[in-house]
Amino acid sequence: MKFEHLIEINELDNPLIPVFSRKQLWNGLVLRAEFPKLFLFNLDTCTITSRSSEGLTRNLQFGELTINDQVQFSAMNFVHYQVPRQREIPTSSMRMTIEEQAFPHLFVRFSYDSEATESEDKENALYDRYRRSAYIEADLDTIKVLREMRSLGRLNSD
């Protein structure tokens, strides 16, 4: 399943929504990778097993389920999560890309790829409809948390 959607960050016609700079938005996307428990409320633990300027690898524990993933950073551009095939978990990826038409028009494009075949996509069509809806809700929650952090000044570091 391939799926993507766009969320507007700076809603200029709503004065109650704080305006993000690109740097603040970037800091928030990196924070989500480094401290996922702030965003994934059903996550029990996250252990970062390696780190570099280009990304990190993590072990995520959800109850009895452990997921190992890699996160790639392209500074001020995108954060790319990759889950290799492991046990019953298929290969998948998610990318959060900052898009800017002209400041202050900032967006985040969320792109998902389960790397399923066309026939697998047809078999899972009903399930994938629910999965897309869950992805959108999770992504809206991510932006909500980032807006709260922005309001508290937690995204202002360099």
Image (tube, helix red, strand yellow):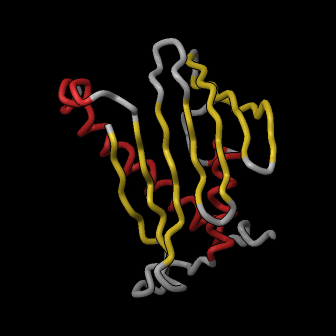
The residue positioned 73% from the left and 40% from the top of the image is 56
| Relative depth, front residue between 139 and 103 | 103
Residue lying at the far top of the rendered structure:
87
Residue 150 at x, y = what percent? 64, 70
Is 100 placed left or right of 121 in the picture? right
**In which quadrant is the N terminus drawn?**
top left
Q: Is residue 145 above or below residue 118?
A: below
Q: Position of residue 131 (x, y in %)?
A: 32, 37
Picture quarter containing residue 129? top left
**Quadrant including the C terminus:** bottom right
Where is residue 15? Give x, y as percent. 47, 86
How many marks can you see? 0
- Depth check: 145 or 130 in front? 130
- 149 over 62 or under it: above or below: below
Task: Out of 54 and 6, give the one closest to the viewer.
Answer: 54
Residue 86 vs 5, above or below: the answer is above
Q: Nearer the viewer, residue 25 or 76?
A: 76
Which residue is pictured at 47% across the width and 20% down the height? 89
In the picture, measured across the screen, residue 15 lies left or right of residue 29, that is left
Give the quarter of the image for residue 68. top right
x 52%, y 55%: residue: 96
